[in-house]
């Protein structure tokens, strides 16, 4: 059974710092991995998607990497801003069957001005 | 604009009163699914649909029903809601074909409270 773990559960950093959020998964048979942002009580905003054949994707100040063989992904946020404060979720899409997303518990990020 | 819409966004109801949460997508996606999000448990899949008239159970289907009569719509039905179904619900859609990135798009969520 696929399990996704995100560490740390919460992170608080001063504005302007570069930071890395971690995601690990137990089964490398994935189709893709998505990173989402969720503001309190709100919906999920897709940030980046990495297909299983790719190593990384970039969007603005965000860079996501994928090492499928070791079951790890990282989300790098450069020059953090208070507006980046949110919960970040990673999810892997299964290759077979339901094609469902299996989510991690998320990292709650706070950027202090 | 490509989007997934859900209605209602907020709902307070009482135990046993049947309700339906609607979900609609305008991207001609084949695949649609429902998730619920609970503190400490994360997001879990309730039901999914690979295409019209094709639905199947996810991880937590008990107490829920779905139907897929049209490609764009995938309503979630609670025949007899109970307090343990108080949660934040998300509908999602994707092309469904394992070609291309198959990115999943999520609706804005429905916050349901069952008293």
Image (cartoon, helix red, strand yellow):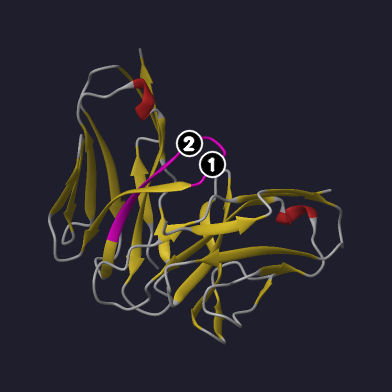
Q: Residue at x 58, y 43 (%)?
A: B39
* Residue range corresponding to the magenta coloring: A33-43
> Callout 2 environment at 10 Å: few (<14), some (14 to 19), or many (20+)?
some
Asked if disc 1 and disc 2 are in contact, CB closer than 8 Å, the reply is yes
Asked if residue A81 is among those painted magenta in the image, a careful observer would answer no
Vertical placement of residue B14 versus B52, above or below:
above
Farthest bottom residue in view: B53
- Disc 1 crowd rating (10 Å Cα; few below 14, some 14-19, many 20+) is some
| Closest to the observer, B22 or A67 | B22
Expressed as whole percent of the image width and height from the top left, the position of residue A87 reads 43, 37
Q: Which residue does the image show at 21% across and 24% down from the upper left?
A: A79
Q: Quadrant of residue A32?
A: bottom left
Disc number placed over residue B112 in the picture, else none: none
Disc 2 target residue: A39
**Residue at image point 23% right, 71% down:** B100
* Quarter of the image with the N terminus of chain B in it: bottom left
Residue B33 location in percent, x, y?
52, 68
Subunit of label 2:
A
Q: Is residue B7 left or right of residue A90?
A: right
Label 1's element? loop
Q: Is residue B50 left or right of residue B100?
A: right
Residue B108 place in picture, x, y as percent: 54, 50
The answer to whether tags 1 and 2 share a subunit is: yes
Secondary structure category for the residue under label 2: loop
Question: How far separated are the C-alphas under marks 1 and 2?
Answer: 5 Å
Q: Nearer the viewer, residue A24 or A40?
A: A40
Tell me if residue A6 comes above or below residue B94 in the rendering.
above
Residue bearing the label numbered 1: A42
Q: Can you give x and y, in whole percent of width and height, for residue A49 in the image?
A: 26, 55
């Amino acid at each position: 059974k696929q399990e996704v773990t995100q560490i740390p559960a919460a992170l608080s950093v001063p504005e302007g710092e570069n930071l890395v959020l971690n995601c690990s998964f137990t089964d490398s048979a994935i189709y893709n991995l998505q990173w989402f942002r969720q503001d309190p009580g709100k919906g999920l905003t897709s940030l980046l998607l990495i297909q299983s054949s790719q190593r990384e994707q970039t969007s603005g100040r965000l860079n996501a990497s994928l090492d499928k063989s070791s079951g790890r992904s990282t989300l790098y946020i450069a020059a953090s801003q208070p507006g980046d404060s949110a919960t970040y979720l990673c999810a892997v899409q299964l290759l077979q069957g339901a094609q469902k997303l299996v989510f991690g518990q998320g990292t709650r990020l706070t950027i202090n001005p | 604009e490509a989007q997934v819409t859900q209605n209602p966004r907020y709902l307070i109801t009482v135990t046993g009163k049947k309700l339906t949460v609607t979900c609609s997508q305008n991207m001609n996606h084949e695949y649609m699914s429902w998730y619920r999000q609970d503190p400490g448990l994360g997001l879990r899949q309730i039901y999914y649909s690979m295409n019209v008239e094709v639905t199947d159970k996810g991880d937590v289907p008990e107490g829920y029903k779905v139907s897929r009569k049209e490609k764009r719509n995938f309503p979630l039905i609670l025949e007899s809601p109970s307090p343990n179904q108080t949660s934040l619900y998300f509908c999602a859609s994707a092309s469904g074909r394992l070609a291309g990135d198959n990115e999943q798009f999520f609706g804005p969520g429905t916050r349901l409270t069952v008293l």
